[in-house]
Amino acid sequence: MRAPVFAANWKMNHGPRATRSYLEHFLSRYSARDDRTVIICPPAVSLEAARAALAARSDVLLGVQNIFWEEKGAFTGETSPVMAHEAGASVTLVGHSERRQLFGETDEMTARKCDAAWRGGLTPMLCVGESQDERDRDETRAVVLRQLRAGIGRLDASQVRRMMFAYEPVWAIGTGRTATPENASEVHGWIRAALADEVGEQAREIPLLYGGSVNAETAPRLMAAPNVDGLLVGGASLDAERWAHMACT
Ligand code: PGA
């Protein structure tokens, strides 16, 4: 049985001060539960503050939103997996569509990042998803599976088995248009089958999250859909009260 995963992606919101007050509020509303995994991905500069605020709550994990693949050096503005890990992260998003679209992240870069994540002590959550144009051209399956296979291209099966994946159709992110549970389920089924080709039966245990304009209303229906094991939530995770409620879906 896969335990559901509820991951909050704050994007470029909540500096250290806002992070402290958010988490104080969140923890007063969300009690530890062993039937699910909750992950919060604050901006990298807020990781330390988040780690301190979560010191007594090992049930809530921290993720970083992006990493670079080198460990250290002359890479202005970048964060290495080792540094993110030291600051409190145990998970990293890789290949979020905003990274791909706004910052030119390619499939090859996601492969390097997934590989670097494991070397630096972070579990990668690889994000995949098609644009509206690609969907209109009926390329969803091809795009999602290309991104998936490329992203895990440098990993061995034992690493792939322990990572997480998020299907986030670009047309649904931040737009208020959520995929239907049937849509999400269909794509998750393709992802699961592709993962089974890579790692065999244990693909059943790999958490597949859906993301894109999920809110408290749509969350329960999406979570009930076959092959949807969790949610990756942006906008609706920015308020502590709402996120505490959603994490109990
Ligand atoms: P959204 O973002 O929930 O605001 O659409 C999801 C994401 O980009 O991870």
Image (tube, helix red, strand yellow):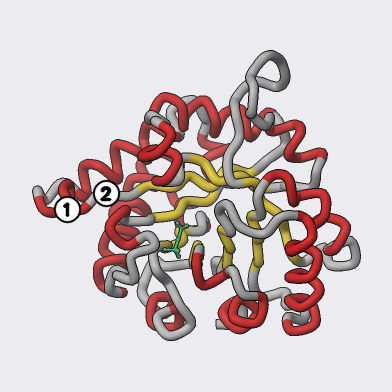
Quadrant of the displayed image that contains ligand 1: bottom left
Disc nearer the start of the sequence (1/2): 2
Is ligand 1 within 8 Å of the beta carbon of the residue shown at mark 1? no
Disc 1 and disc 2 in contact, CB within 8 angstroms: yes
Residue 32 seen in the current view: no
Residue 30 % position (x, y): 73, 80
Say which residue label 2 marks.
Answer: 130
Q: Is residue 201 above or below residue 71?
A: below
Which residue is found at the position 53% from the left and 30% from the top?
156
> Which amino acid, mark 1?
Arg
Q: Is residue 244 above or below residue 42?
A: below
Is ligand 1 within 8 Å of the beta carbon of the residue shown at mark 2? no
Q: Nearer the viewer, residue 102 or 108?
A: 102
Residue 141 % position (x, y): 22, 48
Q: Number of numbered discs present?
A: 2
> Which amino acid, mark 2?
Glu
Say which residue label 1 marks.
Answer: 135
